[in-house]
Image (cartoon, grey):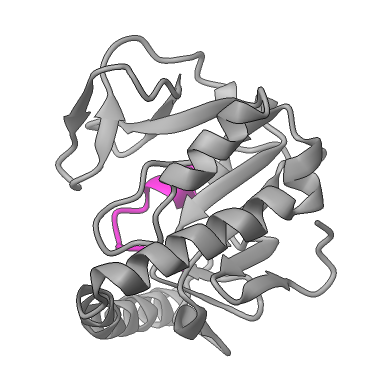
Amino acid sequence: MDGSGARRNDAAAERKRAVRPALLEARRRRDDEQRRAVDDAVAAHLLALPSVVRARRVAAYRSMPGEPGTEALLAGLRERGVEVLVPVSRSDGSLAWALHDPAAPTTRSRLGVEEPVGSTLADDALDTVDVVVLPALAVDHAGRRLGRGAGYYDRALALLPRRPRPLLVAVVHAEELLAEVPHEPRDQPVDVVVTENGVFRVPEASA
């Protein structure tokens, strides 16, 4: 990368750091009733998404406080007999994947996420899913996702084969679907954004 490219990336990273606090604070201000309404609506939209209806294996996640909740989604997938994978963070900044079992013991990761304890699947497990549901702080109309800055998902998604690739679905609150978010070349775009208000399909992506 030449010097001008490095400067652009540095500027984008700085803009990301600048916008995250306001997004996190807005999430903290939501009360329990608002959170429950969002969680139920998001789960309903996700479970009705055609690619999710057809899916046999889905990668999802256990939500952190403040995020749109995923417990209803995870329960709905399991009720359908869908195999659900959830992430396990590694110390090297990569993600492993484990089968979701709501009765299995968990431990809280350094990021504050409840992760299953025990064995994980093969390193190529994410290649075998039909849909990946992933968290974000905000997503723009081009599908560019703003995360919390650790880069776990961008690294995992960058390893997926180009064809065929699972459908990538980000979950945010309605006001977090923006016209544009700060982005860098390494950021992996998603195909679909789900909020409590419905489903936004990124142009040229199918769901």
Please tell me whether residue 175 is drawn above or below residue 197 in the rendered image.
below
> Can you name the residue that lies furthest to the front here?
33
- Say which residue appears at 58% left-offset and 22% top-offset: 124
- The reply to whether residue 198 is visible in this rendering is yes
Horizontal placement of 98 versus 141: left or right? Answer: left
Q: Is residue 190 left or right of residue 14?
A: right
User: Which residue corresponds to the image point at 41% horizontal and 20% vertical from the top-left?
Assistant: 101
In this rendering, would 203 be left or right of 146?
right
Which of the image's four quarters has the C terminus? bottom right
Q: Is residue 99 above or below residue 92?
A: above
Nearer to the camera, 197 or 93: 197
Magenta segment? 146-156
Where residue 83 sits in the image (x, y, percent)? 61, 23
Q: Does the magenta run of residues contain 48?
A: no
Q: Position of residue 68 (x, y in %)?
A: 40, 61
Say whether residue 186 is visible: no
Question: Does the magenta portion include 153?
Answer: yes
